[in-house]
Amino acid sequence: MAVYLNGIGAIAPVPSFEAPGTIGAQAPKGDRLACIEPNYAAYIDPRLSRRMSRIVKMGITAAKQALQDAGLGAEQGLDGVIAGTGWGCLEDTLDFLQKLVVNKEEMLSPTAFIHSTHNTIAGQIAYQLKCRGYNSTYAHRNISFESALLDAFLQLEEQTAATLLVGGVDELTDTSFDILSRLGAYKAPANSPAEGLYSEAANGAWAGEGATFFAVSNVQGPSTYAQLRTVRTVSFSTPADAALAAQWALQAQGLAQADLLLSGYNGDFENDAACRAFEAALGHTGEVQRFKHLCGEYPTSSAFALALAASQLKHKAGQAGVPTSILIYNRAQQDHQSIYLLTAC
Amino acid sequence: MEVLVTGVGIICALGLNQEEVLASFEQHASGMGRAQHLATRHQPDYTFGEVKLSNEALAARSGLPAHLSRTILLSYHAAREAHASIPAQALAGARVGFISATSVGGMDKSESFFEDYLTNPATADVRKVVNHDCGKSTDYVAKKLDIKDFTTTISTACSSSANAIMLGARMIKSGLLDIVVAGGADPLTRFTFNGFNTLMIVDPEQCRPLDESREGLNLGEGAAYVVLMADHLAANSGAAPLCRLSGYSNTNDAYHQTALSDEGEGPYLAMSRALAASGLRPSDIGYINMHGTGTKNNDSAEGTAIRRLFGAELPKLSSTKSFTGHTLAASGAIEAVLSAKALQLGCIFPNYTFSESVAGLDMQPERAFHADASLQHVLSNSFGFGGNCSSLIFSRN
Amino acid sequence: MDQLKADLKKLLVEHLNLQHIKPEEIGDDQPIFGEGLGLDSIDALELIVMLQQHYGVRLTKAESGPQVLYSVATMADYITAHQKQA
């Protein structure tokens, strides 16, 4: 039973994935890497979007783009929607919280409350596409998207689904940026994006956000980007243990090593030391790329990495010296690491 | 391979463990009343299903720091009871997962932080929001229980912990894990109470689910977990199963962000697919623990879906939310624990009160806790915002 | 009363983020739910909050039905009748 990535939709701080070799880091908007947003009216009826917060519009749009990219309409057998979000619907949550405090528990807005639940994104996608199939949302820090993808993997294996929309979505707001900065998550802006981001002179990472959706299926087709071989989380453990898990995953696919390692360096001293430790333990001698200078650090940033990797496998296919297998390694804090293995079709 | 429920843990308005909760039903004593610990200005006027312990008292029982989010305190309390039931022989060499669920995460601390943050942004204590994210409370508890092989958190509003149990079973069946402690936790918060109140679906008096006169839900809090184990592992290690998880399904109503469709399409699909998965017919179900929040919309839509599926011959049914309040993300797991106990002990849980059926449905819930040795299969429903509909079926082992 | 209705129309558009219509395009007696302006039950709840916030009038459950919120005119009537008592 094989799992294929057949469509990708993304709202990210980069314009598109179509020419992955030419994606350069965008200049940060001030102190963060913010998404380049489309005209949502092209994707969502304004009479419906009037109540939606930014993150919900981002999620729906990315999901619809993925479906379109896979050459599917919802009526063509979409079996479910699974989302991962580490922070949830922050804008609505903070809006309701603010009114709660300022109005002293009176005269509060129902709209902000009902859209504050983490599963609003997946729920609204299902509503827009009239999809009555499986629907779930994972909110577990930097393995929220991994959990969603693992669920999708199981669905396809169990044959309870043939095509699913799976995505990772997180948004930044001024308030969340301020609070996370105070918790030491982010570093002060540097002059030049690419070098500055990985400079370890300061702790903290570049703040980012994004919505990335995939049409995932057990059927390969003309739109297929890559075959997803493994997605695994490694918890409460060391980079060496994650490297071991990666080695097993490679061996299971008959690979000595992946052609390319896409690694979650983010400019934070501790994080990047762990990424180097993983590489060393893995014994990877091939090319290493980084991705967080493009999307920034946020809980579901590995979804962006997966899109980047899948795009490379598809758009560069057949060219000399390009990868046919990519291993992705991501982590954000000590507790959870994740690995993905994908191969060209 | 069958997935068995070999242990449970629970804390809610009815008691601090499964024995206390059961005793409350036997005595027909609901846990509903005025909140003693939730600091809301609406306290004098509303009925809640509050756990009868302060944070300090909860923390003292578990040996945890008292400043922690109430979500962690409740979650650990119940998860510990469930985890303690696992025989050492089963744990040795097993791959163990912890799959939890919450809708608010550490919001109890965050809403207190926000009061300071809005007036004094520079000096408000950011340490209060360290455990705000849903996954933080899950990880805290997983570490305390020394569960390392897999953790995650599901957040699909009021169906969350039912979905957590489903994922646990699926991971065992696929061979990824051997044992899963699955469930969820949600505390009372001003955020959720006021949120539901803006929707005008909260009854200030004690709720009356499945009654024509119902005026809305009461908010409750709590945590519950089930231990799921592969049958061969249970047999080899001497774990004593309460029941089997024989079927489950999750679907989406895709009708409205908060309300169910009039004909209850999402609930109907969830129940019928769960039955199909279990290989059972509607007539095999001996008891339905309904989602039964007490809102006009839910009870009518869910009732309609049940009539569509079961026809003229309904099994025994009730909503235990009349005893516990609506515990949001914890409700699926709390009701899973009750379903498992119903099969283990051969008993049926009742409504707290009932006088008149929802118009047009002629549904009469059970009114008194009683023994039923013939009970073989229990259906438990949980429906959440975003059209999320989940049904679990438990069976005598 | 005319000013009240004009204000209500502006508030409706702003508060409910109605991007597809201008305040002056809303008829005084035009039904605002269902086919009229396309509002739904969540909008009804928002309007109840809006009336309380801006005019100090409180709708109890019994009155929050379709009658008061039927049109701009019925809302204006209700505000005029109840504001004195607020």
Image (cartoon, coloured by chain):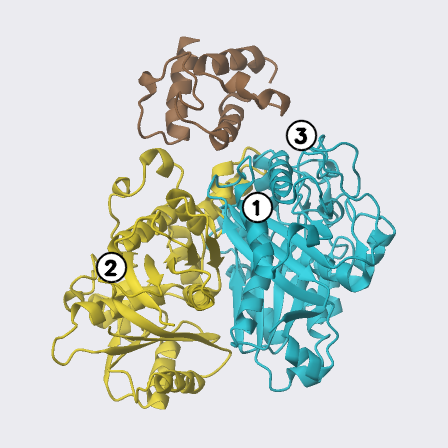
Chain colours: A yellow, B cyan, C brown
Left or right of residue A336, residue B66 in this image: right
| Badge 3 vs badge 1, beta-carbon distance below 8 Å | no
Q: Is residue B103 visible?
A: no
Q: Chain of mark 1?
A: B
How packed mark 2 is, by other alpha carbons closer than 10 Å (few <14, some 14-19, many 20 or more), is many
**Label 1, on which residue?**
B267
Label 2 – label 3 distance at C-alpha: 60 Å
Element type at mark 2: loop
**Label 3, on which residue?**
B360
**Closer to the camera, B72 or B114?**
B72
**Label 2, on which residue?**
A28
Residue at the far top in the pictured view: C1
Of the 4 image quadrants, the one containing the N terminus of chain A is bottom left
Viewer-nearest of discs 1 and 2? 1
Co-location on one chain, circles 3 and 1: yes
**Closer to the camera, C65 or B236?**
B236
Tell me residue A140's x, y (percent): 49, 64
Of the 4 image quadrants, the one containing the C terminus of chain A is bottom left
| Residue at image location 69% in from the left, 42% down from the top | B218
Disc marking residue B182: none
Q: Chain of mark 3?
A: B
Tell me residue B92's x, y (percent): 64, 86
Vertical side of A219 occupied by B84: above or below: below
Look at label 3 and name its amino acid: Gly
Left or right of residue A277, residue B218 in this image: right
Look at label 2 and name its amino acid: Pro
Q: Chain of mark 2?
A: A
Element type at mark 3: loop
